[in-house]
Amino acid sequence: MAKDNDTQMLKGILQGCMLFLLAENELYGYAIGEALSKYGFDEIPKGTIYPLLMTMEKKGLLNSRMKSSPDGPNRKYYSLTAAGVVAKQTFANQWHVLSQSVERLIQEENNES
Amino acid sequence: MKADKIIADNKQQRAKLSTGNKAYYENLTLFMRGHGTLKNDMVLESSLLEILNDLIQAQRNGISAREYYGKTPQAQAQELLAAMPNDIKGFIVFVFGLLFELIGMFTLNDLVLPGSSLDVGRLLLQAAVMVPFPFMILWCVGSAALKATGKLEAVFNGIIYGGIMLALGIVMLLNLVHTSLIVRPADHVVLLVAGSLLIGGLIWISIQRPKLPFIFITIYLMLQLLLAMLYRIPATKNIMTAKLDLGVWTWPLVLLIGMLLVCLVGLFIWKHKK
């Protein structure tokens, strides 16, 4: 159960991060994985990205189109839709509140000890 | 782009993977296809090609497929399948297509001899009973593909072979069933239908060039059509029905021909794999 919650939480965070990455640039699967690794998500198996991309596309947060890549065959590039931009802002707000709350809690715990 | 075109691209691109990475990806593909029979073909195949292209890029950067996609590919693959849309309509169309193909195969079997009658009830029953087996076998093949332990893989392989034997056994047993839905087609009608199917089949083979195991199924069906025709063409009818008595040499000859056929099939498979 705890592991399930961890996975769900991680997926939520990953989804939020992907919204940020795709707001900057149109990217394909491997490039998203590389960008996530650059930001410290290198331990996460990149197989996790594909179901998330599909779910986000299904929810209308992403658009995709086939485009030739600099090195090799055509790739599926993802970009943010208008709904994706709204979802990105919502995630940013939620994360801000959540991180502040958790930070305050940890701070108080540290002060007491 | 059609699913067939994506599958062809996939085969071509797959050659770029190293042996280890290719084995990893092929197991993943088997799992996804085996467990994704309800999913939209285009979406499934596009996703598989997307992953393949990324694995090739990872390999170029010195990252193995396992390192890139993950140590638990089954979990990721299940999640990806869960995210894919179902294609119930496509699945129903496919099931009915399969049902008609099976009815056709069993009908041909019964039509070879002249004056034969078709038990439509039994043919329908045989085909309907057989329909779930390919899906069950495909599911087991997919499940066996990503099992890390030899024991579990062996269990699934056992289920696959057991399933094939069970399916064949059931079909043979159902030959004993007789219903009242009997049709006796006239010989000239059978000749016409068999001739048209044979010509159509030969054109189909030359265009599609079916691969293993479909080539054997196709050859088997073509031979049945040819036999059905030869039995009904007046010029060849007498030769086909002539009594051939070779005395004590009958069985050795049958065995020799059987062994020759097995060797030919073996040689064909060996050459194909090479």
Image (tube, grey):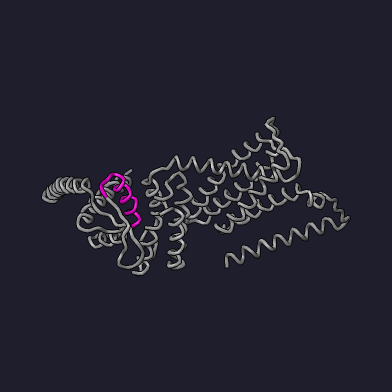
Instruction: Residue at 56% x, 52% y: name it.
Output: B157
Front position in the image: B151 or B86: B86
- x then y, percent, for residue B2: 43, 53
SS majority, magenta: helix
Q: Which residues are magenta?
A: A45-62
Instruction: Residue at 87% x, 56% y: name it.
Output: B246
Please tell me whether residue A28 is drawn above or below residue B175 in the rendered image: below
Please tell me whether residue B50 is drawn above or below residue B178 in the rendered image: below
A31 vs B123, left or right, is left
- x then y, percent, for residue A31: 28, 61
- x then y, percent, for residue B209: 56, 59
Picture quarter with the N terminus of chain A:
top left
Q: Is residue A10 magenta?
A: no
B192 vs B203, left or right, is right
Front position in the image: A93 or A19: A19
- x then y, percent, for residue B34: 48, 50
